[in-house]
Amino acid sequence: MNLITILGPTAGGKTSFAAHLAHALGTDVISADSRQVYRGMDIGSGKDVDDYIVDGTPVKCHLIDILNAGEKYNVFRYQRDFFDVYNQIRAAGRTPIMCGGTGLYIEAVIRNYQLIDVPANPELRARLEHYSLEELKEMLASMKTLHNTTDTDTKKRAIRGIEIETFIKENPKVVPSYPKIEPLIFGVKNPRPIEREKIRIRLEERLDNGMVDEMRSLIASGVNPDDLIYYGLEYKYVTLYAIGKMNYDEMKEQLYIAICQFAKRQMTWYRRMERMGVHINWIDGQLPMEKKVRFAMGMIGKA
């Protein structure tokens, strides 16, 4: 075991659990959240900074506030940034805790995705555009094993797949090499009615604590509203309200529904991970914190 991972649907209590466990172990947390990487996006992304103070002691959390709002971030960059921090913590003799709800980021780390930043090849794309989808499928199949149909469900995807495989063949040393991860994974979840109530209460708190003002401040600072809408959930709906395209009650109700749907999609992602062989030790989110930590420490001691 060289990585502890804490995942679960939104509003389930992951952050506080990760901070308390990190405090008990004397280690750091590495965030796995696709929106908390942005500076100034605090309330909407749920940077619960108070949760990282345990018994008066701050717990270090990495990969928060590393980009300006409006910039684009992706799983390739996350994987690279994660391992930069991971290697530093491991070199200090500690086992880091990855915590977050962005399933793609978590899976890229624990399943060692071989991701590379492949630039566009306009000449290759222009040549391939003349081929039919069936011909492109055959071409891609000759270059790699096709594990699913999403690589070839459109010409655009098939061409991109060929573009990636061509780049790797011509640049065999560009595929990054990362340490093999042997994770111990904990999942925090609540019964659906309690989950929805937690989502409702948290949404009320964020609105009361200035989430609308945060969005207006980001827009006033020069961040394009379309970029905020791109980030989804709170940033989408509150921005639509802030620019006058939705009234307050409509924004609040639609946002609540969207967050509940998002939590359901997160659980669907984690169940898929389990079907693929990833073992998750689920913890009842209603347990007192000391029991959660005690359970996790017992599992860590056996790992």
Image: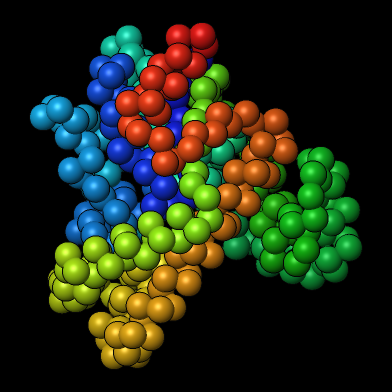
Give residue 238's quadrant in the image.
Answer: bottom left
Q: Residue at x 63, y 51 (%)?
A: 268
Residue 211: x and y, percent? 22, 68
The residue closer to the viewer here, 79 or 160, is 79
Residue 4 relative to residue 289: left or right: right
The residue closer to the viewer here, 212 or 34, is 212
The residue closer to the viewer here, 243 or 56, is 56
Q: Residue at x 35, y 33 (%)?
A: 288
Give residue 241's quadrant in the image.
Answer: bottom left
Residue 126: x and y, percent? 68, 67
Residue 234: x and y, percent? 35, 68
Q: How many marks?
A: 0
- Looking at the image, can residue 17 be seen? yes
Q: Residue at x 28, y 28 (%)?
A: 20
The residue closer to the viewer here, 117 or 185, is 185
Residue 168 relative to residue 91: left or right: right
* Above or below for 55 versus 165: above
- Looking at the image, can residue 29 be seen? no
* Above or below for 209 versus 291: below
Residue 201 relative to residue 10: left or right: left
Residue 253 relative to residue 66: left or right: right
Q: Residue at x 41, y 47 (%)?
A: 12
Give residue 130's quadrant in the image.
Answer: bottom right
Colour mapping used in the image:
rainbow
